Image (cartoon, rainbow, N blue to C red):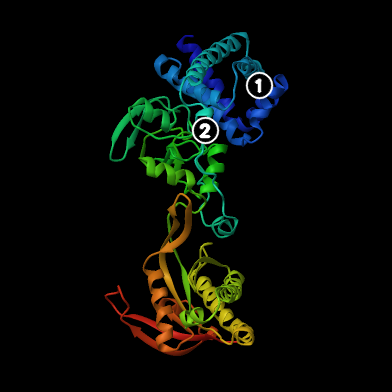
Amino acid sequence: MDTTNIEQMKSAFLKIESEQHAFAGRFYARLFELCPDIEQLFKRVGMAMQGKMVIQAVGIGINSYDHPDDFAEIFRSLGRRHALYGVESKYYPHVIEAWIDTCKRTLGSQFDASAESDWRQLLGSITQEMLQGAKSAASGPETEQKFKRRNENLDDPYLARFLQHRRPPDRPTPAPNTQVISKNVLLNYLGEKTVEVSPLRTVLEASHANGIPHICECGGLARCSTCRVMIIEGLENCLPRSTLERRLAKRKGFYPEIRLACQTRVVGDVTLKRLVRDENDIDMAISGTIGEAGEEIEGAVLFTDIWGFTTFSEKNLPYDVIHALNLLFRNLGQAVDDNDGYVDKYIGDNLMAIFGLGGERPGVSCRNAVNAASQMLASLPSINTYLRNYLGDEFRLGIGIAFGRMVTGEVGFALKRQFTAIGDTVNIAARLESETRRLQADLLVSDSVKANLMDDFYELKRSFEFDLKGKTEQVKAHEISVLK
């Protein structure tokens, strides 16, 4: 095919790009008509994104056609990936016919016999290289059978309630201009090296082609997330997440900048960081769930303390101790839940809760935390009536609340991981809870909590300045109660 033919195809392709939504719809409708079997492969695929990608791929083929080495590398890469997804060689002739039929319908008189011959030559060359890539995938180590999950990722529906709106959605990524992405691009692996690769390759393929020991336990099928990378610069040069990647990213709670190397195709320069380096990282990546990605948030933390619980546990039977604790925690947990808080953990006879995981405003988080504390204290008399009648004892509760920045995420080891919050705000809340006993105060809040409450919401009883362990400066706190 000479230069004139290529330029004519580029001109025709501009019209295809301008009508890409309609063109893709016609193309896949015709493809499924010609080959009903292939439709099964697209049942869980976002067809709008799939349509964009197939048009982009053909556009890159046009622009790289006169660079045989790049052309072969790009489409063999695609062929390997298609083979792993179950695309068989018998489908390719139908793909070509569907594309030709759609071009005839879209381009009209522009698509004469000469143009059809040129397009068939291009699509035939693409198909040939993809089939070569598919052969290497079938004989290589990256097959689905090689992947055996070490742990079943068990999602936490309770935690998902709070985190499903916390993550910012994928930022819209504009469709790349296929006229300017045929040249090679640079991948800068932060702290490792910079490599030059052809466009449309996945980051994982670029790593393996350049001797970078990039881990991928599932063989590039978007199931394990061990190939994850953080895009430091150039996210706009990465094609949007595929359906498989979106599904896993949603499950894991990944930021837009956290991408799967096996799915991320680059069309421009990118700086990235590999996040999984060794066996320890692999285990954590596979066993992690929605809360594993660390995030700094601004929220309120609440701690409760049962005064005299040690004495209570010493003089009662184990069954009665656990029964009494569960009776109390049922009411405390309900108070947290009624006020949009997340029960983080139980620490012996103490409870820790977080408010603000859903991205609530500071005033809302603080008000919810204080309301929950007030509801806890209000439930105590009925609990104590039960305890006095059956166990001859009662509980006294102290609550500490602090507001500020904290780091949230999943911590632990493979068999027991837990979402939690850490940081100075958490420490201050815990210290205030321990001070309630000494001061005989039901509820102590940090100055930052008080600053985010409306004056007509609470009554100020006493104010204090503490020298808290681990703090160089005094911490100001207040004993308050909620106005009815």
Residue 72: percent from left, percent from top: 44, 17
Tag 2: amino acid: Leu
* Residue pictured at 54% horizontal, 62% vertical: 358
Mark with earlier residue (2, 1):
1
Contact flag, marks 2 and 1 (Cβ < 8 Å): no
On the rendered image, what quadrant is the C terminus found in?
Answer: bottom right
Q: Which residue position is annotated with label 1?
A: 102
**Marks 2/1: CA–CA distance:** 31 Å
Which quarter of the picture shows residue 283? top left
Q: Nearer the viewer, residue 286 or 242?
A: 286
Residue 386: percent from left, percent from top: 64, 84
Q: Can residue 26 be seen in this view?
A: no
Residue 153: percent from left, percent from top: 54, 46
* Residue pictured at 57% horizontal, 79% vertical: 376
- Say few, some or many: other residues with alpha carbon within 10 Å of mark 2 (under 14 / 14 to 19 / 20 or more): many
Which quarter of the picture shows residue 402? bottom left
* Front of the two marks 2 and 1: 2
Q: Which residue position is annotated with label 2?
A: 221
